[in-house]
Amino acid sequence: MIKIEASYPIVTAESILDELSTFIDNHYSDYRIFVLADSNTEEYCLPLLNWTSNNALLEADILSVPSGESSKTVEIYYNLAETLLELNASRKSLLINIGGGMITDLGGFLASSFKRGIPYINVPTSLLAMVDASAGGKTGINVGDYKNQLGSFCFPEAVFCGIQFLETLPKRELKSGYVESIKHGLIANPKLWKNIKVQNFEVLPEETGIAESIRVKNDIVGRDFLEKGERKKLNFGHTIGHAIESLSHLKGDPLLHGEAIAYGIAIESMLSQTHTGLSKMDLDEIRNLVNGHFGQFNCGTEDIPTILKLMHADKKNSEEGLNFTLLNAIGSCSINHVLTEEEVTMALEWYFSMSTEL
């Protein structure tokens, strides 16, 4: 078991039931407990928690939504809020979000806004959620095709990462989960990057690797919770990646979040070579890693206008231009690079014209 120093407890362990139960007994023994899960985690992950060993958890009300990004909507959020009201939830209620990034985003926003805020705990069950979505206090839901347009900054009371949950993941989900660790290494931790480069993305990561990736994010968030400055470093790969993710849904062939961010990392690394001096050697190293694990995104130059439109809807951007975090070198980045549509178009054309041959 590894405990990470933060303003709230972050625990990684093979099984987290004992730690979770102890935390609830110590802090929320007189609270009513609700659990938010999706259809997958309800079927595969909840049984791994031996609820019968803890009376408080045994009596929890289970709220379930369909799996996938399509549940991260205003309609689902409203339905969940109505359900909490029907079940007489109060400000002395605790919400436990058990699932991937969709559940921790949705559940965090639900908790932060219901009755003007109730406490919540994240129990991430995917690698992506463990190293990124479950920690940091960002919550949100999508509006139509646009990512995370409604949300809040609200820390969870605790995060419990159970490694056993990763054994339930399909290989594609597991591979997708490594991408945020790739990003953390690229923006702040060259040693983490070196370890990720030789990692087999189809096998479970070491607990120490998960903890190291969480530490990168936690250190940055600890210095800039509301994203006024340094926290923008965590947006590397996401300005273009979020647009590609939305485009894939529009095209009817949805990417996983991590896959879209991987393509965003490749393209924004090219922008980094042009605008912040990332070396060609580093660019090739990054591109080869992304290409080797994920291939290239199946679209072409005719999709560029749609990508640009989706990027302009991103809350990071403005009428003045498109805002990027870019790499200076592997392990170092800088924020607030405002680029024109023409500059971004050149990078997208470069990427879409490239062969999948390395």
Image: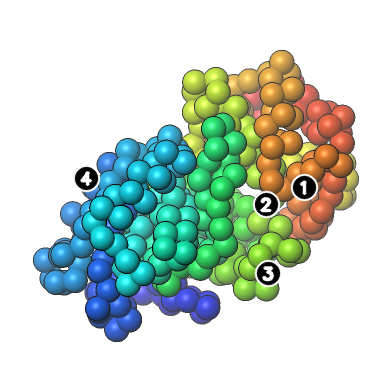
Question: Of label 2 and label 1, which has the lower sequence position?
Answer: 2
Q: Considering the image in quadrants, where does the C terminus appear?
A: top right
Displayed quadrant of residue 32: bottom left
Residue designated by label 1 = 324
Q: Is residue 251 above or below residue 283?
A: above
Q: Is residue 151 above or below residue 288?
A: below
**59 left or right of 107 in image:** left
Q: Please say if the residues under marks 4 and 3 sit with CB atoms less than 8 Å apart.
A: no
Residue type marked 3: Asp
Question: Of label 1 and label 4, which has the lower sequence position?
Answer: 4
Q: 127 or 194: nearer the eye?
A: 127
Q: 125 or 36: nearer the eye?
A: 36
Distance between the alpha carbons at the discs numbered 1 and 4? 39 Å
Crowdedness near tag 3: few (<14), some (14–19) or many (≥20) residues, C-alpha within 10 Å: some
**311 left or right of 36 in image:** right
Q: 264 or 305: nearer the eye?
A: 305
Question: Of label 2 and label 3, which has the lower sequence position?
Answer: 3
Distance between the alpha carbons at the discs numbered 2 and 1? 8 Å
The residue located at (64%, 68%) in the rendering is 225
Q: 61 or 282: nearer the eye?
A: 61
Residue type marked 1: Phe
**155 left or right of 326 in image:** left
**83 left or right of 207 in image:** left
Distance between the alpha carbons at the discs numbered 4 and 3? 37 Å
